[in-house]
Amino acid sequence: MKNVTLWTDGACSGNPGPGGYAAILRCGNHEKEVVGGATESTNNRMELKAVSAGLAALKTPCVVTVVTDSQYVIGMLSQGWKRKANHDLLAELDKLMRQHQVRWVKVKAHSGSPMNERVDALAKAEVQRQRSRADFNGTSCVGCGDLARNGFFCGRCKDTLSPEDKARLWAEHCEVRHD
């Protein structure tokens, strides 16, 4: 079996909000980037999706060393953490991991690891692409600027802002005339 190193990272602007993920696979002198995202996601989903996309890109069974800065990924996939959310992605990953021999390496985020910094930059760039798509498909929250679906406030601001603050922000950002 081939030995592959898979670097992964996920990012999100808001939680939930526009998200991006990136995976870089290296086998010998060969390298492949896999990048994607969603207009509405969570950071944990993007972290899991990065691993899933990387493993799915492999055409044959391999010995895979997954390098991630996500304690969530390590805990969920190798330390038996209780699965409370993201059941669809975790089931997909369970299936993919059965096809390969997978080992896990945790790196510290933003610690100068060149490959970790590279997947981080790719994931963050995808967040910006997804934000552009979200702004086109939705509206920006008048409270914080994140994606607001079905209204003028994102889920976080809708739940945390007082009615008075919502009314003030609405008046500041929305031109409603009562002639």
Image (cartoon, rainbow, N blue to C red):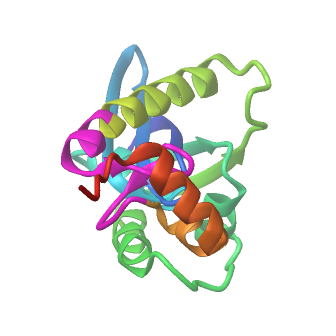
Query: Which residue occupies 45% across, 61% down?
Result: 153
**Nearer-the-camera pick, 152 or 113:** 152
Residue 44 locus on image (x, y percent): 55, 60
Query: Which residue occupies 47% across, 61% down?
Result: 154
Would you place residue 87 above or below residue 2 in this image? Answer: below
Residue 139 in the magenta stretch? The answer is yes
Would you place residue 172 above or below residue 33 in this image? Answer: below
User: How many marks do you count on the picture?
Assistant: 0
Residue 55 in the magenta stretch? The answer is no
Say whether residue 177 is left or right of residue 146. left
Q: Quadrant of the C terminus?
A: bottom left
Say whether residue 103 is left or right of residue 21. right
Residue 143 locus on image (x, y percent): 55, 51
Would you place residue 128 above or below residue 117 in this image? Answer: below
Residue furthest to the front in view is: 179
Query: Which residue occupies 51% across, 40% down?
Result: 8
Say whether residue 72 is left or right of residue 65. right
Q: Quadrant of the N terminus?
A: top left
Residue 108 locus on image (x, y percent): 78, 37
**Nearer-the-camera pick, 175 or 120:** 175
**Splitting the image into 4 quarters, where does residue 98 fall?**
bottom left
**Splitting the image into 4 quarters, where does residue 120 fall?**
top right
**Nearer-the-camera pick, 134 or 104:** 134
Residue span colored magenta: 132-152
In the rendered image, is residue 101 in sight?
no
Query: Which residue occupies 20% across, 48% down?
Result: 137
In the rendered image, is residue 7 in sight?
yes
**Splitting the image into 4 quarters, where does residue 88 fall?**
bottom left
